[in-house]
Image (cartoon, coloured by chain):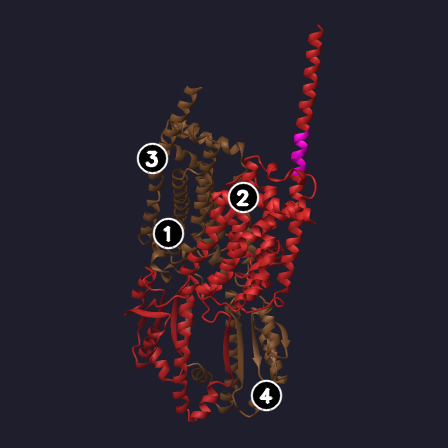
Chain colours: A brown, B red
Amino acid sequence: MRLVRVINRELRRIAYRPRYLIILTLGIILAFTIFATMTSEGQPKNLPIAVVDMDGTYLSRRVCHEINATSGVQVYAVYNNHSEARKAMQQGKIFAFYEIPKGTYNEVLQFRAPHFVLYVNSAYMLAGTLSYKQLATMGMIAGAAVQREIYRKKGYGDDQIMGLIQPVEFDTRNIGNAEINYGSYMMTTLMPALIAFLTVLHTIYVIARERQERSLRSWLNKANGNALIALIGKAIPYTVWYILLCLIVNFIMFGPMGFLMEGSWMLMVLNTIMLIVAAQCAGLFIGACITDAPLAMSIGAIYSAMSFTFSGFSFPIEAMPKAYEVASWLYPIRQYFLNYTDIALFGNGFEHCWKHFAILLLFLLMPIAGAPLLAWQYKLDKKTHKLNTEAK
Amino acid sequence: MIKILKDIWIVLSIEARRVFTDSTVLLIFFIAPIIYPLIFCSVYNKENVEDMPVAVVDESPSEDSKRFIHKIDATPEMSVDYKCCNIEEARKLFKDHDVRAVFYFPKDFATRLETLRTGRIVVYGDMSSFYYFKAALLGGNNVLIDEMQSIELERYEKAGLTNQEAEIQMQPVVYETTTLYNPSNGYGSFFLPILLILVIHQTIFLGICILSGDANENRYALKLIPPHLRNNHTQRVTLGRALCYVLIYIPITILDLWFIPRWFHLPQLGNLYTILEFALPFVLSVVYFGMTIGTLFVRQKISPMLCFVFFSLMLFLLSGMVWPQQSMPRLLFLFSQIFPSTPGVQGYVKIASMGGNLEVVRTEYMTLWLQALVYFSTATLATYLKQYNRHRKKEKLHKVHASEEILRKLRITHNTKE
């Protein structure tokens, strides 16, 4: 009954001032649209690269054509000297360039191996790596084609030729993202992480707002002074809303957008719910403990700004200093990410991920720890109020 | 002229007092830009994954496969922690995340090599992070190339080619690769320059928004402006405020964009003068951008912090470093140019990581000055409009008061007459 009263009060407050809920929801939708349109092709297409053709012969032009035919990259320009290409690279106009030195054609005529140099700009992580990969593959294929021609003329069979050109090969199977789709790699963790820390901040915000409006007393009065019930009641409307949002986002990603979902949907739904609830518990704890509203908000912001790093999806936690591995336990998104890889990418069942669920459950203790502090503040507030009224 | 300077000075000192008396703003202006780079730099200090655990399944034990496994173990990227008898065992390790890649030598590996055909190795890679994938790919490829050459040489000898002929045959074209600007291809060298610019952008922006929220909440926004500047010369107000923030951020910019990259051995080819010259329009445009948004939209002191992390993430993704600008949809690219962080990040990376000068980053430099100019006008306009509205409201109130006063007086006179 007390709980219902608090929820009722909170709903009324939201209805009275729905601005921030609307803004944040629109923000999530905007972020989702931007991610989805940006990464809709899976990998960046048409990466501009260049060729420095110092040879200027039939052969070098052939190479240009060949590069143009390679998927993923396109020849932005053909330069005559190294410095021009280098400058274009510095300006970010191209991500890589091939340099064909002078006298290449002559060397080929004399049966000597010509030297091609490939320069790659790796300051742009993704673009540099991808253009390198495409160009290196192209180089290998082109080289192999030359070799094959020679062997064929010498009278070898095709199977033998392959054995000579490439004695060992890798058959790579990328578990969890077969076609290396960057969209599925980034969005599946970034979107829930975004919603989770907005939940944290919003929870802190609504509590901080009570403090600023000096309505702490009326809020806790609705719960008959029980701080825990007051906290839970305050959180529930937002819990429902953000769980709903996160579930919708996940359904869109794993449904129509076709990102890999190997395991059970039920576990993923549970994972999502636990993520939001745990995030909210962290928010409730910070909100209840820190009495100064701006300070509580800044601590919330500092805490959540690190959540992408400590989810470990971009850069693995194992490669960080040990202390940060411990710090990552403070973030529900870390457990969510581990669960997500287990469930969606590896198709593992509950027996694999129960540990992470258990850690997420531990977050539920946070508001219980924060409640006595809030109760104490409430008592203090009541006392001063009483004194004030008596004084009047 | 002296009057203008004096006005600017007055505004500046008022603003500085506000900054230095607000603990939240102090935290954001002076602690955050130092703490964040330090934390992030130490987090990403290792740059790459080292000694990633892998498992091997060797179903055709031979000299070749053994040598191969040894070489994999010897790479800096990987260490062979498990040798499994069958693929099922390896799969279990893989599913339990005990290993991040599995190298599987099928039964026919040795026989294929003996019969001079292509031996096939199956690699299972964990794609939950690209760094696992990268480590397996990079380390594996190095071993592969090394192995290939020794096997190839053997085979050419068998095929009756001399050594020299064989070498030419092996590589009809020699490809050399030079990786520029981030030689180890590490995450830290890539991410941290972006982070440094974003930290400056976000702390200025957030601090200014909090200050305007504070002024609005406590209803002393009007009092902050000297009375004679309230109705005209608003540009002096915005100039004075901006000067205050720019002065505060000069040491922070030098620290963040110059000293910290040096301490943590990030790629740093630019010189201090170029960086500072580039940072000036950047800081200015961020300041005016913050003032515009703060004056127009911020009503509460704590609400900017609600959107802050979200906004940072968006700026990071739109900066064109994650997803190349050339591959972005046109509309998104134009949208990203609204924010000073986009040209800021692009320009700073080109200067600091790639050793460019101002001529190289001319587009970004000009964009930043243009943004500074546009946001200066919008900030001035917004401040002016706010003053004007306040003033009118006040006047209206005044008029109401005045008419009430007259009515009251009339009533009094009426009463006394009666």
Residue named by callout 4: A103
On the picture, is A303 further left or further right than B364? left
Marks 4 and 3, the one that precedes in the sequence? 4
- Say what amino acid the circle numbered 3 marks: Pro
Can you see residue A322? yes
Residue named by callout 3: A372
Q: For the stretch drawn in magenta, what is the main secondary structure?
A: helix
Marks 4 and 1, the one that precedes in the sequence? 4
Helix, strand or loop for disc 2 = helix
Q: Which mark is residue A335?
A: 1
Whether discs 1 and 3 lie on one chain: the answer is yes
- Between the residue at mark 4 and the residue at mark 3, the CA separation in whole angstroms equals 81 Å
Is residue B338 positioned above or below A289 on the image? below
Pointer 4 chain:
A
On the picture, is B336 further left or further right than A339? right
- Between the residue at mark 3 and the residue at mark 2, the CA separation in whole angstroms equals 38 Å
Q: Which mark is residue B17?
A: 2
